[in-house]
Amino acid sequence: MKLDRTQQPPIEGFGSLAMPMPQIEQLPNGSQLYIVDKGDQEVCRIDFLFDGGRYSTPNPAIADLTGPMLRKGTPQMDNDAIAEHLDYHGAWLQTATTQHFSTLSLFSLNRNLDKILPTVVDMITMPTMPEKHLEILRRQRIQQLQINHEKVRNLAGEAFNKLIFGAQHPYARVITAEHLNDIQVEDLRQYHNSNILHTGTRILLSGRITPSVATIVKECVGNIPVQATHDVPCIEPFTPQEEHNAFVHKPGALQSGIRIGMPVIGTKHPDYPYLSMLNLILGGYFGSRLMSNIREEKGYTYGISSHIISTREDAYFTIVTETGTEYTQLLIDEVYKEIERLCNEPVSQDELETARNYLQGRRARALDSAFSMSDYFLSSIVSDTPLDYFNSEDQAIRNATAQDLLRVAQTHLQPRNLYIAIAGEKA
């Protein structure tokens, strides 16, 4: 049939979205292997997820430095040889650290996995952690801290964390130059022994997973020696401060960094999908109310956004922006007005459908590839969200009404509960 290009194609909403569950296997050493087999490109990705992170160490910088130091040498290869080995075989490696986890991710061509993975296993099990590379990494991190300390955005974020988590809460800790200078190689080795080698390790294998790829991974990873036990620290609840405002003076700053938000419900709460839709409408995409009002109409900022950040046990809502010093109070007033609107007026049907379709489109991208699906499962484990949450969330989003959103806004987004942190020129 010939396509009639003079006629606009019909616009249809999203149907139901379902996330296929990964295949989960227990390896001989006690580690869990999650397999996401999708796609026809002969590539794979392996994510190693280790319990630990900044939360479990007296010095939070130890966890941050241990990950990068894993790739600085093994008994068989030094740093340069590892870099050349990865590059020659078309592989790529990255590390990351959160409050409760450390990750090491490998991207490899399937045909070269048997040459690359043994080297990665050596990094995990026998890192040499040369002193000279620790010194280089330390200097780089201190320089980055100095740069970040000049940005009002970061200063406001640090003050905001102390407000909503509590000044003494581990989540509110800020890595300083003193933290970095205090670290010795032995500190990293102790952290590695306690938090990298243990039975809590989870491995996510995604991509085009042929039988040979699966066999290589199981043979290499399943033989990693682990400790018999690992103590998981008790996580402190948020202890928000009684004072709801904080100000950080940055002399001569031309802009104010602003963070506004509050603790909110997490993904396990039945109202969370509706709260997620409210966040999208308020400041979760370019067409949001905050962007339309404060950027497009008022011109107070280049960008403003809102987010819901999940932690291991809880979650918090936050609005992030910067503005010219003279617009600081005007911008804050408009933020309050927009949140009050959500609490007092039902959203229109058009706005609700736009938000529903946008959110479903964003969720659909998680189904695009094995790697995007693996990202979803990785974040689910990190935030302690059930792996099948994607599917249960789908029904709530498709059936949400304006009255559902109004009820949740009135229950969970009351303006009187907001905390505000500002960094900039006090005058």
Image (spheres, helix red, strand yellow):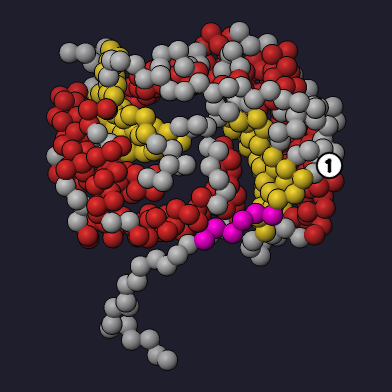
Residue in the picture at 53% in, 8% down: 178
Q: Which residue is mark 1?
A: 28
The secondary structure making up most of the magenta span is loop
- Quadrant that contains the C terminus: top left
Q: Is residue 315 left or right of residue 255?
A: right
Q: Is residue 36 above or below residue 248?
A: below
- The percent coordinates of residue 116 (x first, y second) are 78, 44
Front residue of 377/185: it is: 377
Residue in the picture at 66% in, 37% down: 49
Q: Does the magenta-highlighted stretch encompass residue 165? A: no
Q: How would you rate the neighbour count of disc 1 (Cα within 10 Å): few for under 14, some for 14-19, many for 20 or more?
A: few
Snapshot quadrant of residue 121: top right
Residue span colored magenta = 18-23
Q: Does the magenta-highlighted stretch encompass residue 22? A: yes
How many numbered badges does the structure rendering display? 1
- The percent coordinates of residue 53 (x first, y second) are 60, 25
